[in-house]
């Protein structure tokens, strides 16, 4: 890996790299640079199935699929619940009576559960997490297709990145807030995304 000092733009030779401490010392300006860990680099260079990492002059992008074996459970449940709700709606309107309109309120909890099940089914089937790092800023998108939840922040606001068991959530901790990113339920790609985020943070800090 070629290491360039962000302060004087000199190339740092390998003999000035302290692998054990993840540090490099520029031979020209003597600046000490924090480097991505060897473990993070190894994980990024060998992404698991359903994960990818790309780096170019404009920035870095990491993508993981949230698709999991849970879809084997959620899809049949989703189909059964959909049929059940369709039957209930048909019966209600077929025998509609103004005196029973108030009973519709009892259906609301079931509709909320259905909406949650729909979301989980789509995420376990088509879901993804996309992380884009550009000019010291980051965008994390969680969703399916173009439908989802984007979150924005600056790397300088992040003090710590770690994984929170047992739900395979990755936490980006800021000074006054923290951001949680849900990954695949099986945890197969969580380690990859954690390493990618740590790498992006170190690289962004070097390019200040």
Image (cartoon, rainbow, N blue to C red):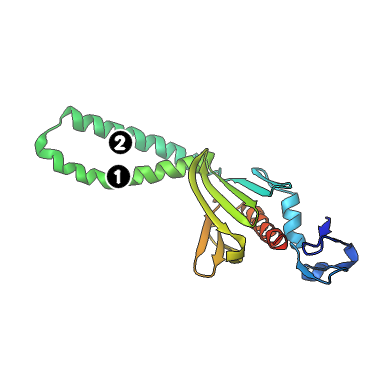
The residue sitting at 17% across, 43% down in the picture is 103
Residue 153 placement (x, y as % from top left): 55, 58
Q: Is residue 174 left or right of residue 30?
A: left
Give the residue furthest to the top. Answer: 94
**164 is higher (above) or lower (below) than 117:** below
Image position, residue 151 (x, y; %): 51, 53
| 192 left or right of 182 in image | right
- Viewer can see residue 169: no
What residue would you read off at disc 2? 85
- Taking the spot 58% from the left edge, 65% from the top edge, the residue there is 157
Residue 11 visible to the viewer:
yes
Looking at the rendered image, the quarter that the N terminus falls into is bottom right
Instruction: Where is residue 134? Give x, y as percent.
Output: 64, 52
The residue shown at (60%, 50%) is 131
Count the labels in the image.
Answer: 2
The image shows residue 168, relative to residue 49, as above or below, that is below
Label whose residue precedes the other's in the sequence (1 or 2): 2
Rendering coords of residue 67 (x, y %): 56, 43
Q: Nearer the viewer, residue 120 or 84?
A: 120
In front of the other: 102 or 27? 27
Residue found at the very far front of the displayed protein: 8
Query: Which residue is at the far left?
Result: 99
What's the CA distance linking mark 1 and mark 2?
9 Å
The residue that label 1 is drawn on is: 110
């Amino acid at each position: 890996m070629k290491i360039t000092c962000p302060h004087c733009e000199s190339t740092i030779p390998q003999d000035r790299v302290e692998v054990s401490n993840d540090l490099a010392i520029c031979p020209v300006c003597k600046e000490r640079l924090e480097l991505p860990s060897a473990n993070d680099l190894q994980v990024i260079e060998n992404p698991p199935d359903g994960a990818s990492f790309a780096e170019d002059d404009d920035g870095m992008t990491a993508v993981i699929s949230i698709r999991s074996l849970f879809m084997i459970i959620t899809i049949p449940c989703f189909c059964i619940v959909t049929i059940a709700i369709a039957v209930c709606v048909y019966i209600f309107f077929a025998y509609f009576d103004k005196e029973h309109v108030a009973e519709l309120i009892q259906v609301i909890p079931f509709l909320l559960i259905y909406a949650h099940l729909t979301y989980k089914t789509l995420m376990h089937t088509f879901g993804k997490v996309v992380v884009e790092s550009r000019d010291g800023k980051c965008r994390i998108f969680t969703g399916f297709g173009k439908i989802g939840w984007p979150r924005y922040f600056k790397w300088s606001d992040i003090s710590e990145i770690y994984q929170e068991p047992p739900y395979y959530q990755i936490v980006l901790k800021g000074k006054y807030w923290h951001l949680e990113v849900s990954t695949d339920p099986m945890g197969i790609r969580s380690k990859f995304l954690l390493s990618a985020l740590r790498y992006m943070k170190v690289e962004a800090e070097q390019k200040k």
